[in-house]
Image (spheres, rainbow, N blue to C red):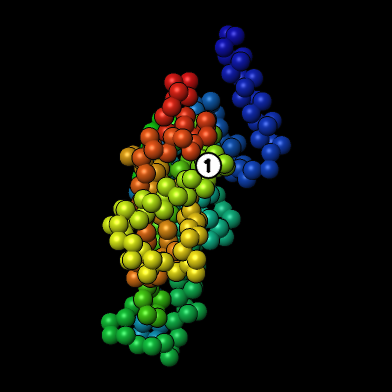
Amino acid sequence: MKKTLIAVGFFCGLMVMLAGCKTKIDTQALNTLTSLSQIAPADIKTRPITMEDSVVLHGIPGTVKIEADFPESGNFFVLNNIREWMSEQMGGTYEGDMENAAKMFDHYKKATLTDFQENIIPDMPRIKDMSCYKDIKYKKLQETDRYVTYLYTQEGYAGGAHGWYLMQGQTFRKSDGRRIDYDIFRTESLDELTDLVKDNIFSQYFESDASEMENLLTMENNDFFPLPQAAPIFREDGVEFVYQQYEIACYAAGMPACVISYDLLEPFLTQAGKWLVNVGHVAEN
């Protein structure tokens, strides 16, 4: 009986806290919570969703395809944050129920087709067998008892010299849905972390060819080397740091990336970061 009262008190206190916080929460979904199990760090169950449509303007087809491992059950806060992140990756204009995957993805499918209709023009340079397209994919990449990582990729072509490709990951802490970014690395260690990433980009991606790396870097001062703008991707064997096309190098260089093991990254992590990836003495706590 005492444990039940404690659980009820915790649940009620949590609702009061959420009512006063500024973080966006799907209140409709929040009202459907019926037990504490829905806010426990459970595994994230997904279901596959595929949606595709096309238009033809001036003889030029435009196709959009969306594929996703859509989160269906698990910790409410994690589900809510993953769904919001999915929406934001596609523009953040959807205003409906985040639980309704079909409705959300249909919104962005129609928005993409509208973009095609506005940008495919009669005098667009004609290329033999040319077609415009956008392919979007969300994949649940990695899951432990402490976090889940999603990968977002987008590939497309809308005329011009070449198409585009981008890849971004996002990790969510399973206890509360927190989005993980560079804030789990100690602030005073970021310069050293940047040097470590640069060294690994040099050895892993450019295969230790210094001249190739220097020739392909687009920065005026090659001594300045930033961390990727996108969040680090937490994989099974370590953290992947990915630079998007044009971010640090020309188009021909592709997307420079490297993976650094958790053991090597341990000195740069905050206590929360060490716990998240289960390294160091805090892993036992």
Horizontal arrangement in the rendering, residue 255 relative to residue 33 (left or right): left
Horizontal arrangement in the rendering, residue 51 relative to residue 114 (left or right): left
What residue sits 28% from the left and 82% below the top?
129
Q: Relative to residue 135, is residue 20 depicted above or below?
A: above
Q: Check the image and name the residue furthest to the bottom.
A: 123
Specify whether residue 60 is in view: yes
Expressed as whole percent of the image width and height from the top left, the position of residue 181 reads 51, 45
Q: Check the image and name the residue furthest to the right.
A: 20
Numbered-mark total: 1
For mark 1, does the 10 Å Cα neighbourhood hold few (<14), some (14 to 19), or many (20 or more) residues? few
What residue sits 36% from the left and 64% below the top?
213
Expressed as whole percent of the image width and height from the top left, the position of residue 22 reads 68, 43
Q: Which residue is mark 1?
A: 189
Q: Relative to residue 69, is residue 50 depicted above or below?
A: below
What residue sits 41% from the left and 76% below the top?
158
Q: Amino acid at mark 1?
A: Ser
- The answer to which of 214 and 238 lies nearer the viewer is 214
Q: Check the image and name the residue furthest to the top.
A: 1
